[in-house]
Image: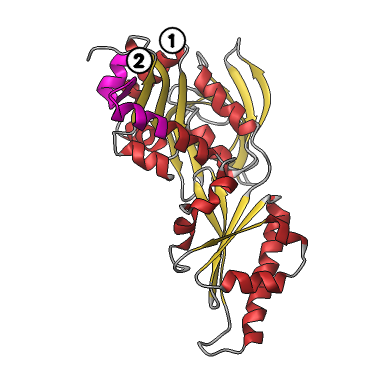
Amino acid sequence: MKILKSNLKKGEVTVQVQTLDDLWYLSQVIEPGDLIKGRTFRKVQVKSKDERASEAAKRPIWVALRAEKVEFHKYSNILRASGMIIEAPDDVPKAHHTFNFEEGTAATIVKDKWFNYQLDRLREAASKKSFHTIICVFDREEAIIAVLQEQGYKVLAEIKGQVEKKAQKTETKNFYREIIGLLKEHDKKYKVEHIILSSPSFWKEELLKELGNDDLKSKIVVATCSSVKGGINETLKRAELKEVLKQERTANEERLVEQLFVEISKAGLAAYGKKEVGQAADAGAVKLLIVTDKLILKARQEDRFAAIEKIMKDTDKSKGDVYIVNSENEPGKKLDALGGIGALLRYRISW
């Protein structure tokens, strides 16, 4: 993400979406009541040449829209802000409209007040390194290649090898070369720093032999999975990948959630659930608030976000940190089992 311009005195921050991960970050920042300014597409009535009739045609326009609803669809990578148009060209009615965010979109977000946790999300997205981690799970007959993202992973390719159960070794090598070709292609496209190569049995060693002394080899970390189907999730849980993934956001989420669970287990300085955490935030006792994006999304959909938002803003006002974790990852799933919200406290309070 690029932060193109910032004028917090006017409550304005202009950003440009560069990657699909940026949509996840923006979904944690944009909220109902915000003003969204930017170029969008809208159907507008256009008169025909004889001016006797008009027809609707989509054209790019500049609008200022007051967001009423914010929706993020992880699996289709769509972020939408819907609401009433406040400003637009004279021929565009002040009606309801949906502003779609996608790669390349530039927009100005205007808030009455920007909280630190919201600015932190934007800064985190803007400072993200350009490298990605590629994971390839395969055997002699099929392969799946994916790139790790903030919201889990995105499958880039699924291929089948042209081999039978008793195929000759040369045919298997041809399949390995096809996998290697794809890995090189995605290595160049995503500026990869690590490639996780995972397979059942000895197939990864055979592919490494085929790779020889290629420069790609220096980026490879090997792992084991029981099968290609479900192999990506299985591989990501393996201990040998902790060193590779320690730079990823997931590792930090794991550390924070684990710290929360340790405090809970010893009845220490921790709270969980909306009621307890809300009381702690109201008392200014929250040092670190951890919330899952699933809880935020569900609360918005059910029009119950005001209570969650108050906890986040109370924490921010008392100089506590707010951290939003991804429910697609293991730490987020663990926190969702506790209600999707927990806090590390400055001091113990009575419930």
Residue occupying image coordinates x 49% and y 57%: 235
Residue 186 sits in quarter:
bottom right
Q: Amino acid at mark 1?
A: Ser
Would residue 345 be visible to someone looking at this image? yes
Residues packed near mark 1 inside 10 Å, few (<14), some (14 to 19) or many (20 plus): some
Rendered residue at 58%/83% (across/down)? 162
Residue 87 percent location from the top left of the image: 56, 23
**Residue at the far left in the pictured view:** 351
Q: Residue at x 53, y 87 (%)?
A: 164
Location of mark 1 (residue): 318
Q: In which quarter of the view is residue 272 placed?
A: top left
Boundaries of the magenta span: 258-280
Number of marks: 2
**Residue 242, percent across and down?**
53, 47
Q: Secondary structure at mark 2?
A: helix
Q: Is residue 274 magenta?
A: yes
In the figure, 126 relative to 309: above or below?
A: below
Question: Viewer-proximal residue, 106 or 219?
Answer: 219
Horizontal relation, residue 76 to residue 244: left or right: left
307 or 180: nearer the viewer: 180
Q: Secondary structure at mark 1?
A: loop
Q: In this view, which residue lies farthest toward the front?
A: 266
**Residue 139's spot in the image, x, y percent?**
53, 73
Q: Residue at x 41, y 44 (%)?
A: 330
Residue 310 is one of the magenta-drawn residues: no
Where residue 281 is drawn, which disc sits there?
Answer: 2
Q: Where is the N terminus found, in terms of image quarters?
A: top right
